[in-house]
Image (spheres, rainbow, N blue to C red):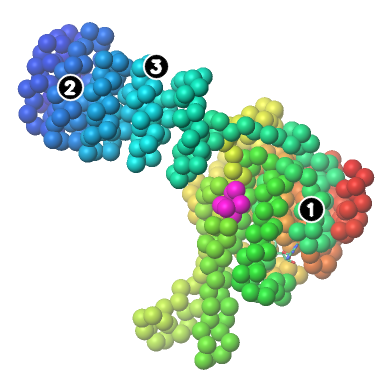
Amino acid sequence: MITKSFIEELKSRDLETLYKLISETKGNKELVFILENLGHLPQKFDIGIFERFTKNSNSNVRFWAVKNIGKRSNPNFLVLLTNIASQDSDSLTRREAVSSIGRMRDRQAIPHLITFLQDDDPKVILQAIRGLLIFKEDKVVVEELEKLKDHPNEMIQAVIKKEFQKVTRNSDVLPHTISPDYLKNVVVNGDVRQVLELVPDESIHLTFTSPPYYNARDYSIYESYQSYLDFLTEVFKGVHRVTKEGRFLVLNTSPIIIPRMSRAHASIRYPIPFDIHCRLTKLGWDFIDDIVWLKPESSVKNRNAGFLQHRKPLGYKPNAVTEYLMVYRKKTTKLLDWNIHQYPLDIVEKSKIKGDYETSNVWKIDPTFDSVHSAVFPIELCNRVISYYSYVGDLIFDPFGGSGTVGKSSTNQGRNFFMTEIDKRYFVRMQETLGKKGLFDTNNMSPRFYTLSEFLDIERKD
Ligand SMILES: C[S@@+](CC[C@H](N)C(=O)[O-])C[C@H]1O[C@@H](n2cnc3c(N)ncnc32)[C@H](O)[C@@H]1O
């Protein structure tokens, strides 16, 4: 039986026997095993031996033959690889051929790679782009690549944008780690849409929020589901503007049921997370993750009573024990490392998550019930989101502040908060709880509570 170590040995001691082995192996499985395990090829290795396998009927054999030819980056194989890339029936082999042409880093390859910018397979185009970006100083290459800026494929568009888009930055924007002091540890009693107009671009590091439910509780009355979604869209458009480059929005929602009017009518279930998702991505929020908040079944409304009795299919109604935390990132061409590198090392060190942390996207957390507010975040939920998605000293925003759990958790974790809340009762409650002396020892900025007009004055003075 042929083993990896046998191939290694022949490669270093007896190339003639290795050529013979490759040429005479009949079974495709064995042949693929040899081709796949050749690893680095010595300089004197004759890669011409792979040429005949590029016509093999087995696509795996062809793929590995191309891969081995590509290891040498030899322009003598340019025409062969171009033919394979344009004619092979297997997309992986075609992609590998284009990638091999790119790896040659040879100017002769430029016209060949340019022809693949018109390919039907976006991955072939991406390989060709990769090869051409080595010659980014070449005018023709730049012209050809820029033609792809409106390509229908989103990955191609993103690569071209990253390479060629001129970034115009608002010169008033504060450095990445800094937020305006007048927003720090502030709660404004008002409609978030009006308050947001007073917040400068790129001031916020993280938004974590649970929007009002659609007609589910007394504080949330909207004319229609459409107008409810329009309202949320307007809010998250504003949140997008005030969020710093590449930072996160974590949105807690769940489908909601509006009970039937009478026995003659059906209840309606609204898939809020799914309907809001497309609107958010259109606003420039990139989808990052979906986290499921799992509650004990005993803590949620029982919908099972009927089915328990009648057991008739179609009448099945599961108890809803989950809510979503949808994680989005403000669209940027920069990698997360860029965001992290903006912070000094001591802040990075202080912000590290110590000990155990949640490893899966299912977070089992008991809900919290509150005597004044009917839909509060459990503090544990806030603690996790804030510690996983922000750094010490950051400014955390909750547009729908409610009882102020985001404020409490931010403070406890050395972050600052900014919250808006439309309902006076909840605002007063926050003054009582968040305003308590001693709670804010970790931050030097004590909490302040403003009406909309007071906030307007402060914003003007700043
Ligand atoms: C689901 S609750 C948030 C609860 C909060 N996460 C907590 O832990 O207490 C939604 C809150 O949004 C507030 N709200 C609704 N419409 C608003 C608006 N246009 N501007 C600001 N707050 C609003 C409601 O009064 C309600 O307190």
- The type of residue carrying mark 1 is Glu
Q: Nearer the viewer, residue 294 or 122?
A: 122
Q: Position of residue 236 (x, y in %)?
A: 66, 55
Q: Position of residue 379 (x, y in %)?
A: 67, 56
Q: Which residue is mark 1?
A: 197
Query: Which of the labelled discs sits on residue 429, or is there none?
Result: none
Question: In the image, 412: left or right of 280?
Answer: right
Tell me what residue is drawn at x 53 percent, y 47 percent. Answer: 288
Residue range highlighted in magenta: 280-285
- Crowding around mark 3 (Cα neighbors within 10 Å: few <14, some 14 to 19, many 20+) is some
Tell me what residue is drawn at x 81 percent, y 41 percent. Answer: 180
Q: Rounded to the nearest whole Å, what is the CA distance between mark 1 and mark 2?
A: 65 Å
Quadrant for the N terminus, please: top left
Q: Rounded to the nearest whole Å, what is the CA distance between mark 2 and mark 3?
A: 23 Å
Q: Which residue is mark 3?
A: 107
Q: Give SS at disc 3.
A: helix
Q: Nearer the viewer, mark 3 or mark 1?
A: 3
Mark 1 or mark 2: whose residue is earlier in sequence: 2
Mark 3 or mark 1: whose residue is earlier in sequence: 3
- The type of residue carrying mark 3 is Arg
Q: Which residue is mark 2?
A: 51
